[in-house]
Amino acid sequence: MNGTHLLEIAGASRRFGGVLAVDRVDAHVDEGELVGLIGPNGAGKTTLFNLISGFTPPSAGTIRFRGRTINGLRPNQVARLGMGRTFQNLRIFPNMSVFDNVSVGAVGTLPQGPFGALFGGRDRARRISERTWAALETAGLTGVADELAANLSYGRRKYLEIARALAMEPAFLILDEPAAGLNDTETADLAAFIRRLHAGGLTIMLVEHDMTLVMGICQRVVVLASGRKIADAPPDAVRRDPGVLEAYLGGDEE
Amino acid sequence: MSGFDARMRPLAVRAGLALLLFAVLPAVLAGFDRSYYYQVANLALIFVLLAASLQLVTGVAGLLHLGHAAFYGVGAYAAALLSTELGLGFTVTLPLAGLIAAVIALLVALPTMRLVSIYFAVATLAIGQMLYLVMLNWVGLTKGPNGIVLTRGLELFGFDLSGRLATYYTVAGVVALSLVALGRLSHSYYGNALRSIREDDQCADAMGVRTARLKMEVFTLSAFFAGVAGALWAHMTGYISPGDFDFGESILILAMIVVGGLGSLPGAAIGALVLILLPEVLRDLGDFRNIMVGLVMFGCILFLPKGLMGEVSALRLARQQFGAAWRRTGNGVGIGWR
């Protein structure tokens, strides 16, 4: 195995009772890539996502991130290693302002003891402010910085979640179904935004149920079905892959 | 560039409050020249500090804490015993009272912090009762229901501060300093990390916030300030007994931050002033005054769901706490603990 992969999943499995949700999956993400992870409902995408982000420990296998084994680390430890994420079912902090929401990403990845806040700590407050404003700017949210997050439209909340992850200044960003609930125009805007982030040097993994967004922007697509990896290739090859067509059509999806 | 600094209270407001606290109010008190007014002013200030310190745990970090008065009691007993048994002065007893309360809080926090929501609330209720029962029944140490009389007056670096005005200034000074510290903790990036725990602790975790550690820290810090408030109370009144620190007091402090609004430090101060001063103003009504106070709180919940200046509604927080007790989530979270 070479140690240059940013994220390396080796034989990862996860069992829930009698169900093998993820079955010996090998996959990797290299620095600078924009990778898609797709699969029909129940394919194990979310479980694999949770294994990567530390929400669920794997039953077997290892997950390495930036050369470190991250099996069994808490989500906040994984996050502080440089992994930012968003949630499938939007999880913003509704009773906080947009600025404060995004600042949590910056706080989370910097030293966060109380004594910095108590005694001086101007420097750290400034760094957090700067990171927060930079993330708001990238996501186009500077105009609503003082708005309560609960007052944002559904579409804007998606950007808020991404901005919060960007404030962590992550080395790797994983987006869980970012296009869910968006119409075609909004999805196209989002695709352009993700491409811009990627062009800025960020490594990104998209987890998507729907193929169109992933096929449009990703360099490489990993396909899961029934917990197993069935394809790992550029979009064009995946589109023609008989196994993938079988999994999607056979599962009477679309 | 706006940021956290721009979000702080403007300097003029702070200067105005300082002027009110250290010039206008003492002048008015001196004008009336009645001990009763001094007592009420000191009591109100001590409860402002208690409400502000509970605000950090319950309003900002969203942990329903039902035993805050017990740590207030620990501070008061620590100060009283250090003063009467060891003859230590106020300059030593005040910080030690805070530290002792904080250490006890840290010890009880270690096993309870993994409890979630309502289970945590019940645990704090139990801790509060345990500490109260220790104060009541460990007669050898605390003299039980008889309470402790402090023989030494208030003094600072050898200066006698037991006069009415000097006592007021001491209480006001300590409370003001503590409020500045609590303000920095709750209205800053640290406060935002705490708020993220209140809003969605799993999500905060994924953002890199060390939720378990932060909860423990904030519980301990809040007990420190409750202990300081206890020391002020002991030295101010010169007599303490367990009844001052029972469950009812915890609920009273909780009511203050609900009336003032969860999450806001000025809200906590205003809530404390309302619930301390209202019964005093209504003293002429006799027993009716308690009904009036109850009505104010009831009206507050009905018509001001977020209190006077709160960030979240008390009912939402309560629903969140109780709801979690029977909401099963799939992410390795068992029922009741994490």
Image (spheres, coloured by chain):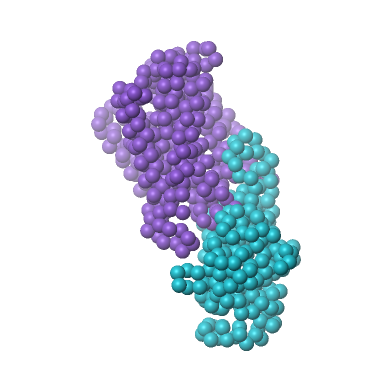
Chain colours: A cyan, B purple
Q: Nearer the viewer, residue B236 or B330?
A: B330
Residue at (46% x, 46% y) in the render: B113
Residue at (47% x, 27% y) in the render: B97
Q: Image quarter for residue B246?
A: top left
Q: Is residue A32 left or right of residue B78?
A: right
Q: Nearer the viewer, residue B188 or A60?
A: A60
Residue at (65% x, 48% y) in the render: A110
Q: On screen, A66 above or below A187?
A: above
Quarter occupied by the N terminus of chain B: top right
Residue at (40% x, 26% y) in the render: B77
Residue B159 visible in the shown view: yes
Q: Nearer the viewer, residue A140 or A74?
A: A74
Q: On screen, B31 above or below B326?
A: above
Residue B191 position within the rendered picture, expressed as x and y whole percent measured from the top left: 55, 44
In the picture as drawn, the residue positioned furthest to the left comes out as B287
> How many numbered circles are shown?
0
Q: Nearer the viewer, residue B263 or B320?
A: B320
Residue B18 position within the rendered picture, expressed as x and y whole percent measured from the top left: 54, 27
Q: Is residue B140 left or right of residue A23?
A: left
Q: Image quarter for residue B207?
A: bottom right
Q: Is residue B254 left or right of residue B93?
A: left
Q: Is residue A159 left or right of residue B257?
A: right
Q: On screen, A108 above or below B56?
A: below
Residue A33 position within the rendered picture, expressed as x and y whole percent measured from the top left: 72, 68
Residue B75 position within the rendered picture, expressed as x and y whole percent measured from the top left: 44, 28
Residue B323 visible in the shown view: no
